[in-house]
Every structure is written in C-alpha cells, then in structure tokens.
Image (tube, coloured by chain):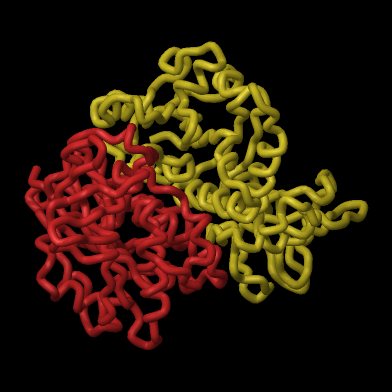
Chain colours: A yellow, B red
Amino acid sequence: MVKKHLAVAIPASVIADTPHLREKTSKIGYIGRAAAIFRVNEIIVYADNPKIEQNVDLDLIATLLAYMETPQYLRKHLFGLKPELQYAGILPPLRTPHHPLEGRIRDLKVGEYREGVAISKTEDRSLIDIGVEKPAIIQQTQVDMNKRLTVKVTKIGNEVEAKIATREEIPQYWGYIVSVERRSMFALLESGEFDLTVATSKLASSFKKTAERLEQKWSKAKTPLILFGAPTRGLYEIAKDEGANLNGVVDFVLNTVPNQGTETVRTEEALLATLAVFNIQFDN
Amino acid sequence: MVKKHLAVAIPASVIADTPHLREKTSKIGYIGRAAAIFRVNEIIVYADNPKIEQNVDLDLIATLLAYMETPQYLRKHLFGLKPELQYAGILPPLRTPHHPLEGRIRDLKVGEYREGVAISKTEDRSLIDIGVEKPAIIQQTQVDMNKRLTVKVTKIGNEVEAKIATREEIPQYWGYIVSVERRSMFALLESGEFDLTVATSKLASSFKKTAERLEQKWSKAKTPLILFGAPTRGLYEIAKDEGANLNGVVDFVLNTVPNQGTETVRTEEALLATLAVFNIQFDN
C-alpha cells in the first residue's frame, strides 16, 4: 500500500440546519474527531450551494476545524479572540500524537517531534515555542513568525535544541490540514489534485460490488478524495445544480450506509460511517 | 438471514466527561441517531462503575433516548416537563418511518401503521391519538391510558378506525426500545437474553480474522448484543473491576477501529463506526 494523502470534502451547508453556534461547534467537533480517528490528512470545506452566500459558514467551519487541530499550547499564538470561537471550549480533544499531554522539558525525548511557532529570532537562530517551559532553539532564521511549524528535538540540556521537520518524515498520524474551496464542488474535482475521487450517496447501488472494483485503485492511490453531500441536498443534486452528472465527474459513487433506517444520514454521521468502512475494507 | 432483535449496550459513564447538560444532550442525540440509522432494536444503558452512584446518569440517558425515539406528537402525553429535558430541543430528529411528517387525516392511508396513545375509552372502544386531527377508534378497551401502542389504520371515513398491531408485523424499521441495567455489565451478560455477544475493544486483535469466524454466527443470531465501553475505561477494565475476564464472558471481542489515529475513541464514535462496519460486513 502506498503512503496516502487522504482528503475528505464536506459541504458548507453541513451546519446550515443547526441554528445555534454552540451546536454548530459541537457538530464540527464530531467532524474533526472523525477525521483524526481515521487519519485523514486534509479536510476540504466546499461551497455547495451557488444560490446563497456561504463564505461565513465556510470560514466558521474552517476556523473551528483548524483550531481543534492545533495543539492547545499554540492556540493563543495562532488564534485571536474570534467571535466564532466563543464555544470552542466544548470541542472535544483530538488526543492525537501531535497533541502531547506532557508540557515539561523533563518529559521531552530526543528524537521527539513537536508542533511549534517561532516567537523570536536573532542573527543566527530562532526560538520556537513547543509547549514546554522554555522555547526550543533552532539554528535557522528562515522561519515565519507566529506560523506553525514542526520540529524534531535534537538535544536536551540547558537549552532544548531542535531542527525543522517535515510532516512526511513523521511515522505517526500528525493531524489534518484544512482547506476551503469557495467556488464549487466541480472546481474542486477539476483541480487535478486527486488521483482517485469517491462520492458517497444513498442513491448509489450495492456497496459490495463497487467496493471490489474500488479496492485495487484505492491501494494504489496517493491522493484520494472522499466527497460528502449535505443531508438536505445529496451529491447528485449538488452536481446537477452545477450542470454536471455526478457519475461523470467522480471515479466512484458508493453507498456506505445501505438499508439506512432513517430518511437521511447527516454529513458528520456519513463521514464517520464511511471512514470506518474504508478503514476496515481497504486498509487492513 | 434470520430476523434479528439487535441490541447495543452503552455505559452510564458515556456522559461523565461532559460537564454541561446541553452537551450531554447533544451526545445522547448522536447515540440515538446512530442506533436508528443502523436499525438497532434496543439500546441498553448499563452501570459500568460500581464505585460511584450512576443512577442519575442512567436515568438521564434513558429518558433522553426514549424521548428522542417517541414521535413528536406523543411527547407531551408521555413526558412531563422534566428538568433533564431542558435541552431536548437540540436533539436531532430521527426521521424514521414511525415519525411521520404527515399530521392530517387526508394524508393517512389504510394499512398504515402509527404510534399512538389511548386518551379515553367507553364501554366498547378506545380513542387513540395517532397525531392527526381526530383520534382513531379501536374496538377494544384492554389498553392502558397514556401508554404507547402501535396501531394499523383499517378504515378512513368520518372516523378513523384502527386495530392494535405488534412491532413484529411491521416491515420497516420501527425504532428502538430503551432498557436500563442498574447492576453491572456482567449481570446483563448473565441475563440469558442474548444468543450472541460481541464486545468492542481497541485491545482486540485484527478485525478481519475475527470477522470471518463471527460472520456465520451473526447470520444465525436472533438476539445479538454489541457491547461498548467508556473512553476512559474500556471493556477489559470494566470486566476486570467486576472480577471477570472479558474474553471469558462474551463470545467475541472485536476491534472495529484498527489503527486509530487518536488515543481514544469515544463511545458515541465507536457505536457509529461499529454499526457501520457490521452493516457492510454482515448485512449485505
């Protein structure tokens, strides 16, 4: 199995039927959790309804997902007191390896990776807050202030020394990035970023048959995308409104919740269910 | 495949780490939804920690799940103004066939099933509120007042006539019942109500191998039970506290979320993920 960059796309209207920010926050919390449980690398929030202005919802969802994915000790650096974060306190913790519970130098280990932000620099080095008593030192100044970066701890003495690392070199799951596609689902699919695209729909036929054809392609895919619709407007309808036929613009359409007992499955439910099924069917 | 009575058991401490009633309500909402999506027939809430008093939590979870499963037009009859229902307004609708959106006689069909409650009776008949303008008449008086029952519409004229029906005769998914096991997980397993018991645990070995052995038994089981632990205390630990070894008291232990990206999977997440996997693996 090749190493994957797994992306999922969710529509802006996922929170449209939830009137209060507190429950919107809670719903986005479930989405972030589902993504982290199943090692999703990128969550894309896309505009799914050209008839209405969706920028506020797109930004709200993206901000909350990014906040949730940020280690607690970096949140103050990276997020101000935004009104959309009013209920961020109810977001469940991700409990991923990049959100360490340890906040002391004596618990650090050489070779450990930490997320950090540069808080100052001199002529030849930068100081990085990595969530312990003292900032770590890196022998490099080509870093942006107050932007996230990943470092690897190289020495622990009077000072903590570290070097910049890439996400690719880290063996564990290291969180997701968040992107926004403000144009449309179609624009996202046209971007050419994905080598395999899978849509979920309750109108699709039997899972098992499609799964057999998908399995081989999935095992070879490096940048697969799983696309989710909104409960009130499924992906066939969203595609149709954009003048497209869903079957023509994605590689596979799957029903991952056959024989559903409820009239609709909400996006956050479909996301968790689909990722659970993919995890068992294709990754074991 | 035999017709199943599928039961799931969730621990009282599922809401223990959520301080506010509003988020407890939201979490229970996800549990009720997951159960309905995957056609669960019974949700059992069990006491999982003998060291603490859990009756308040057991009752809260059971009340909210039962409220959610009750068609909207019967909720006032069956639930008073209980303080634990303060945030019931945020519970998502189930959208199951037994929660019809139609509330008028002209939309009723002969042969249709409806949930109802008896609101009065005369010598030879009873009046049942089935959520339309006028109560339906059944030619029977052996019914409890203000208790739920299921009826089948037999005639629509000046009056709506109906007869009592059983859940078993209804072809569609017709909601879940809620039970409480106040003693322990072990007491639940000892009850003899289940012909197949499956526990979920992140400590269990590879899903695929166990699934092959489970598949046959699952297809024959009439009263299977899937058991869930709490995020802070898995089923092995819960069993151990009761002096039992999990492997010895259930038929199968499965990990339905192999390679999880997060340290823990919450009960409501494990429930949805597990039911999604079972739905694809065993029911198609």
Q: Going by the picture, which residue comes out furthest to the right?
A: A123
Quadrant of res A210: top left
Quadrant in which the N terminus of chain B appears:
top left
Q: Please state the horizontal and vertical placement of residue A30, each as a whole percent of the image.
A: 51, 52
* Figure quadrant of the C terminus of chain B: top left
In terms of depth relative to the viewer, which is nearer, B24 or A40?
B24
* Residue A268 position (above or below residue B224): above
Residue A187 is situated, as x and y percent measured from the top left of the image, at 61, 19
Which residue is nearer to you in this view: B254 or B229?
B229
Residue drawn at (76%, 62%) of the image:
A136
Residue B200 image point, x, y percent: 28, 61
Image mark count:
0
Q: Is residue B92 left or right of residue A104?
A: left
In the displayed structure, would residue A133 be above or below residue B49? above
Left or right of A27 on screen, residue B235 = left
Q: In front here: B279 or A56?
A: A56
Residue A168 shows up from this direction: no
